[in-house]
């Protein structure tokens, strides 16, 4: 695979250099839009405009959608008005809206000027919905049928109007005032008798989203019900658009990437790793690193406070990283489980007590297991095997008791914080590992010194 | 929403108690299979069998697929042979194979006995592919067309055979010996003239997966190319099945959940959080916690080794959690970015040098920023503000120099380990936060003490 890619790249470069445009065109028409767009990424800007102009109209528009927004902008700037119009005419409305959102104001003006009035209205319609809402990812191009049509009339209507619609596989049935009353798949239409009425074969149990619904919730509906498309209605239950499954997949991936990033203290950039500049990566990471570093002030203060005790029992020092580390890991296991459950819609805030009770029992099991193992490890491995004479039975006891209490505390903090974040409409993923770790670090040190003082009497 | 659900649950319970079965049936036929299955989860086992028998045949099978495997098993055990046959007849092959995989041997035997021979062969066919391969998630039911058919004949064939096929939206064109030579969407067929040949309207540039391809790579193809279905071929390019977009969505979610779990040191259970028992959760978490705790032996040894120096400069102690914590966070930022890029197919092992060079520059930027901020924090906040007289200019210098070196080391380790894991065919996600943190903890302590010894001359 890798080698073929390399051979292919060399071929394209050579053909470009020797200006074999007809051959290049022949190659590109056999390719998928996504692959042509990927190929364009390795091509110089002046060549890119040239190559793009070789593409047939429809393929050109499909490829345009798949390109990086910087390249799109560059192309638009190099287009004549009529070239721009040709591309815009071929775009689906939701793709056009996505592109418009990424462009600077003067480019947006040109795009809208070259769109026909209907397209312009639809783009403006989509742009006014909040980011990450169902309205912002829907398309306003769909097939709507009337309940009184026959299956034959419906299929005719699809054949006549369907060519421009993003999906014709599910058709929506609406009344005269655009109220959504049912849906029928093209599959049902095809296997029905010609003269059956849409009203009789449609499914009235239609699940829809509202324009303001969160895109993540919309995407979860797709995976729950195995939809190809989901209708979007306004507050008066009038059909205004549809979300298609390909956009739902993008949302699912995007949201997972965002959550994974937040869990590792990285802000969202929305760009693939290799496309991010060093400065962008730095900007996405450094605020969190500074914040978390500053919050370590608490742990410093706690250690400083117990400085004299540590000077007496210097052996206690050696186990601080093990205790805070295990605490942090225990806490992030819980927080990450809850956060993922919340984003998949498997857990809701109303499950608070059930989750708490479950995590509490898990924390007891984990706490007891780790207390036992850490006792054996400290006493026999660190003490006996590595011959550390300072490790007495009492010291091992202090450490294993701290271990148990730390793990229980960590898991409880780990399950409560994300649920509270959800309740107060913060992103629970922000409550993930790094923040939990910082809180748990401080708590485990406090537990350590309190337990040590009680048992060792300092 | 929540309140409605509660009202609905109460209604169902009351109707069940008063044995209003006809009403219950009327309610259920208006519902989606996924919602009926969700409702069944809160119903007692004996009532469940009763309710299930009220469902019409097709809805019963669709609901069965959406149920938890324990409930499926229980239902199968309560079915008569003819009841079982009715359900099995309505199942899609890939769903049947999924169910069979979860059942104990004696139940599997009964299911296979009640399947017709063709279904039995297809189930066995799917079951022989490795887990997580394209073959294991495909269905063997698809519409195949011949190149010499006309559009009209093709549509007729779909109308005749399509009712049992999982997707009819994309049809695959094969030769007499089952070689895959193209595809045509039902949309293209519908908007073509009746007498156009499939060979002339089909797209020959068909992208397919091989039965042994990894399911994650297959799912990535869906998001790259916006497919509704993807054909699966054997090693001789013969069409053997298709993967549908709903299964691709499940794979995308499942793989993200698996990665997120691994990044937080949790083994995969494949079950939603609330469905896992306390013991199952414990089992998924405790091995990692023990492993990571045991690996803290290194940090203990390092601290013990420098015990006498620490006794002299006891102030150094207070900053150990800040240094190891920031190091851990820096490292996991890098590892998580690379791991996500690898799973999305955005990064490959061949990008090693590019990734390394990028992370190296990011680590310099982050290292310098954090060194500066930590110097100011330690000297002015911890030293002056909290009046810690032990913090001198030299101590602040030791800490900020260690900070810079730790961050650079952490980011480099964080980007190299996942790439190496990918190269040696381990799951890169295993190299995520907790393991990186343990390695970085030990490295940052070493750096700390070496830097301190050089500057403080102990």
Image (cartoon, coloured by chain):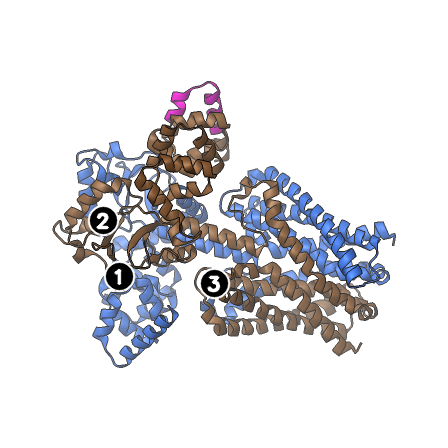
Chain colours: A brown, B blue
Residue under the image location 54 percent in, 71 percent down: A359
Q: Say which quarter of the image contains residue B77.
A: bottom left
The magenta stretch spans which residues?
Answer: A8-26
- A7 or A283, nearer to the observer: A283
Q: Say which quarter of the image contains residue A219.
A: bottom left
The quarter of the picture where the C terminus of chain A appears is bottom right
Say whether residue A18 is magenta.
Answer: yes
Q: Position of residue A159 (x, y in %)?
A: 21, 41
Residue B174 seen in render: yes
**Alpha-carbon span between mark 1 and mark 2:** 23 Å
- B189 or A420, nearer to the observer: A420
Is most of the magenta stretch helix, strand or loop? helix
Name the mark on residue A341: 3
Q: Residues within 10 Å of mark 3 (few under 14, many from 20)?
A: some
Q: Chain of mark 2?
A: B
**Alpha-carbon span between mark 3 and mark 2:** 37 Å
- Secondary structure of the residue carrying numbered label 1: loop
Name the mark on residue A205: 1
Residue under the image location 35 percent in, 49 percent down: A244
Q: Chain of mark 3?
A: A
Does A149 sit above or below residue B314? Answer: above
Residue B128 seen in render: no
């Amino acid at each position: 695979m890798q080698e073929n890619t390399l051979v292919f790249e060399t071929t394209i470069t050579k053909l470009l250099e020797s200006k074999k445009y007809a051959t290049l065109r022949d190659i590109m028409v056999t390719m998928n839009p996504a692959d042509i767009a990927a190929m364009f990424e390795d091509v110089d800007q002046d060549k890119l405009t040239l190559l793009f102009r070789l593409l047939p109209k429809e393929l050109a528009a499909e490829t345009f959608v798949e390109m990086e927004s910087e390249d799109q902008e560059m192309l638009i700037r190099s287009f004549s008005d009529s070239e721009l119009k040709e591309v815009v005419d071929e775009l689906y409305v939701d793709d056009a809206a996505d592109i418009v959102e990424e462009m600077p104001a003067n480019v947006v003006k040109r795009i809208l000027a070259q769109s026909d009035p209907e397209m312009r209205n639809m783009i403006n319609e989509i742009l006014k919905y909040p980011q990450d809402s169902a309205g912002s990812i829907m398309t306003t191009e769909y097939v709507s049928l009337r309940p009184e049509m026959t299956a034959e009339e419906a299929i005719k209507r699809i054949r006549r109007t369907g060519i421009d619609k993003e999906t014709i596989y599910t058709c929506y049935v609406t009344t005269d005032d655009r109220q959504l009353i049912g849906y029928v798949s093209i599959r049902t239409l095809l296997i029905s008798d010609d003269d059956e009425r849409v009203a009789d074969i449609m499914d009235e149990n239609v699940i829809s989203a509202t324009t303001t619904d969160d895109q993540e919730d919309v995407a979860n509906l797709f995976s729950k019900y195995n939809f190809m498309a989901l209708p979007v209605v306004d507050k008066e239950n009038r059909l205004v658009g549809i979300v298609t499954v390909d956009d739902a997949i993008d949302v699912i991936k995007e949201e997972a990437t965002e959550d994974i990033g937040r869990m590792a203290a990285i802000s969202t950039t929305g760009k693939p790793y290799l496309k991010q500049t060093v400065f962008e990566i730095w900007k996405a990471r450094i605020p969190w690193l500074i914040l978390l570093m500053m919050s370590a002030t608490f742990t410093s203060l706690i250690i400083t406070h117990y400085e004299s005790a540590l000077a007496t029992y210097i052996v206690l020092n050696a186990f601080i990283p093990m205790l805070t580390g295990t605490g942090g890991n225990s806490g992030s296991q819980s927080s990450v489980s809850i956060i993922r459950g919340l984003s998949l819609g498997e857990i809701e805030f109303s499950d608070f007590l059930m989750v708490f009770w479950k995590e509490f029992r898990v924390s007891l099991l984990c706490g007891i297991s780790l207390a036992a193992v850490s006792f054996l490890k400290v006493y026999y491995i660190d003490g006996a095997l590595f011959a550390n004479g300072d490790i007495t039975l009492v010291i091992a006891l202090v450490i294993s008791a701290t271990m148990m209490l730390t793990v229980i505390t960590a898991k409880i903090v780990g399950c409560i914080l994300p649920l509270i974040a959800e309740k107060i409409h913060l992103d629970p993923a922000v409550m993930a590992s790094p923040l939990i770790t910082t809180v748990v670090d401080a708590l485990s040190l406090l537990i350590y010194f309190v337990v040590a003082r009680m048992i060792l009497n300092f």
